[in-house]
Amino acid sequence: MFKPSRALLQKVSYNIKPYKNMLKDPSKKYSAFKGPDMPERKWPNNTITKAPRWLSTDLRDGNQSLPDPMSISEKKLYFKKLVEVGFKEIEVSFPSASQTDFDFTRFAVETAPDDVAIQVLTQSREHLVRRTVESVTGAKKAIIHVYLATSDVFRDIVFNMSKEEAVAKAVETTKLVRSLTKDDPTKQETEWSLEFSPECFSDTPTDFAVEICEAVKAAWEPTVEQPIIFNLPATVEVASPNIYADQIEYFCNHISEREKVCVSVHPHNDRGCGVAASELGLMAGADRVEGCLFGNGERTEIIAISEKCNKIPTHPRAPYGGSLVVSAFSGSHQDAIKKGFLKVNERKAAGDESWKIPYLPLDPKDIGRNYEAVIRVNSQSGKGGAAWVILRSLGMDLPRTLQVQFSSVVQDQADKLGRELKTEEIVELFGKHYMYTGKATIVLEDYTNSKTKGSDGQSRDISAVLKVADKTVQINGQGNGPISAFISAVAKEFGMLFEVVNYNEHSLGTGTQDKAATYIEVSFLDSHGQKATRWGCGVATDTNESSFKAIISILNGLIRDGEISV
């Protein structure tokens, strides 16, 4: 059976050549980014103790990154969902870019709840600023988001602008926005806020970012009640998240009138560290996070828009939203999760609502998932996975040895099919191998149970009516209890002597009419004279009946296996 594997692993000669574009010395072409000097940084010892302000830029930054941008109807659907989710700040568009963006902004202004701020983006150019302010006229809350690239590479290559000229341009734009908004007596029905982004902050000398923001703040004159938003984007993720955190802490420490400033982070994900940069930025003093729901954003993923609107599939393991993110296939993981759920139920019964489950730091229901998605069963799954499915689907808490036996049945089927088994397939397998269903060869029609007094004390007499392959058969037996009496009756009829090895039962509910589940394991001599064991399960309102059904399910299994002929 191992020959194919050995053949695959035999030494093969490959003509491997170095990748032709591999640089021999990358340091000659690229230099490491140097962040601010922070020998006494404090953020590593800080803890995030409160939620930040959140802004969704799915409809703006997310939309502009799509190969096929959202239609108006898709944007409206998405905007409605963002409001339902609970976002209080939503960046909806670049309204000066097109009539479509302008019209959608008007839709957002006219339909947003009073407590939701509509944010719009504009470049630092007068005609674009005027059009942008016009788009949000009449809003209850509006944020004008102005940006100006401040990194050396942008100023030198794109704008040919000195630092002094950049500061002057930022101040000029700020004064224009102010005159068109909070200083305009005809627009006092709107609560106006200004957001300024020194674009490419992550690649900007941090002291210059502070300098230009100080000038903007002085021109806007924020208050404690209406702070200015300084959005510090990692437009290009040029360094590790700890460097970004240093930049944020430096900015927070050096900007004046900190109580009048809301520091916002807007991390991109070039290096795959967008979420880490956000969290470290909050530890470093930031108050607000801008991003998209599942990671879609300009150039690379920021922090992803729903597949319905952006037409980009979400990775199955994407944090929180992926279809497999709370799913466990590993047997040891499944067993731990199953035990964790049992403990949660015990704590709930005692009035403790705390959530403590291995491998699940969050309750899946709190992120819109169901518990059926938690444990998924394939050939790698152990006893806990299949047992969990039966517990969630049928309410049956299988004894440990039955869990082990059933897991082998499930693994064999998963191997045979070469895929994960669905919940209904696992339930069907359990029914086929262990459950009394009333549809197999032997069916319990009726029974009577009475006590008799013999020389050795009281005993039980059982008389049962069975349907065996469409024939009615009456069996009778005697024993020191109902189960032993029924086994005696079975032995007389089918020539198979059982010995009970394990017996378990539990209620499937809490009311007086609820059913009981009974699990019985018996030992017997098989057709080769070898000792073997088999489990059976029965469910009924009476524990005697559920026990008899469990034994009959064992008989039906032995008939399928050819151990008993009828």
Image: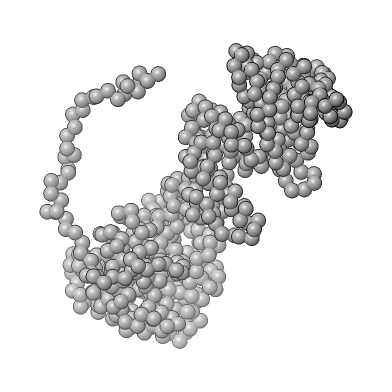
Give the residue drawn at x 60%, y 19%: 531
| Horizontal relation, residue 316 to residue 494: left or right | left
Residue 123 image position (x, y, % from top left): 32, 70
Q: Position of residue 425 (x, y in %)?
A: 59, 33
**Color theme of the render:** one colour
**Relative depth, front residue between 163 and 95:** 163
Image quarter of residue 354:
bottom right
Say how many tags the image has: 0
Looking at the picture, tell me which residue is in the foreground, 456 or 64: 456
Q: Position of residue 561 (x, y in %)?
A: 63, 18
Q: Residue furthest front?
A: 455
Please say if 142 is above or below 381.
below
Residue 500 visible here? yes
Q: Residue at x 40, y 61 (%)?
A: 291
Residue found 45% across the figure and 68% down from its top: 49
Q: Give the vertical position of 338 relative to 450 (above or below).
A: below
Where is the N terminus found, in terms of image quarters?
A: top left
* Residue lying at 44% horizontally and 63% vertically, measured from the top left: 56
333 left or right, relative to 560: left
Return the residue nearer the eye: 58 or 494.
494
The quadrant of the image that shows the C terminus is top right
| Residue 417 shows in this picture | no
The location of residue 431, given as percent across then percent down, is 65, 30
Would you place residue 537 above or below residue 507 in this image? above
Name the residue nearer the viewer: 266 or 97. Answer: 266
Q: Is residue 66 above or below residue 90?
A: above
